[in-house]
Image (cartoon, helix red, strand yellow):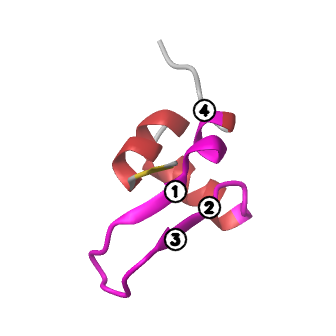
Amino acid sequence: MTFGQRKAAMIVGGRTRLMDLVAKGLIRCEKKNGAQNGKWFCNAWDCVKNARLSY
């Protein structure tokens, strides 16, 4: 299962945090087409595992 970039960012606590986690290799993401504005496919388990609880 995968999430798009916006859904994954909402789960992990923001776009900046998502980018950091992807750069560290803690969340596996891929873009299936090479376009600049192509959809991201982020691994759902990695996103849930690195979720941040916010109130």
Task: Give the residue drawn at x 31%, y 74%.
Answer: 38
Q: Residue at x 49, y 34 (%)?
A: 11
**What is the number of the mark on residue 42?**
1
Q: Are marks 2 and 4 in contact (CB under 8 Å)?
A: no
Q: CA distance from mark 2 to mark 4?
A: 13 Å
Q: Name the residue located 37 percent from the left edge and 83 percent from the top edge.
A: 33
Which numbered disc, 2 or 1, marks the residue closer to the eye? Answer: 1
Are discs 2 and 1 less than 8 Å apart at CB?
Answer: yes
Looking at the picture, which amino acid does disc 1 mark? Cys
The magenta segment is 24-48
C-alpha span from label 3 to label 1? 7 Å
> In front of the other: label 4 or label 3?
3
The reply, left or right, for residue 34 in relation to residue 16 is: left
Local SS, label 2: helix
> What numbered label is drawn on residue 1?
none
Contact check, label 1 and label 4, Cβ < 8 Å = no
Mark drawn on residue 22: 2
Q: Amino acid at mark 4?
A: Ala
Is 41 a magenta residue? Answer: yes
Give the residue at mark 3. 30
Image coordinates for residue 9, horizontal then vertical, percent: 44, 45
Please report whichever mark, 3 or 1, sits nearer to the chain's N-terminal start: 3
Of the image marks 2 and 4, the number of the one nearer the N terminus: 2
| Residue 40, quarter of the rendered image | bottom left
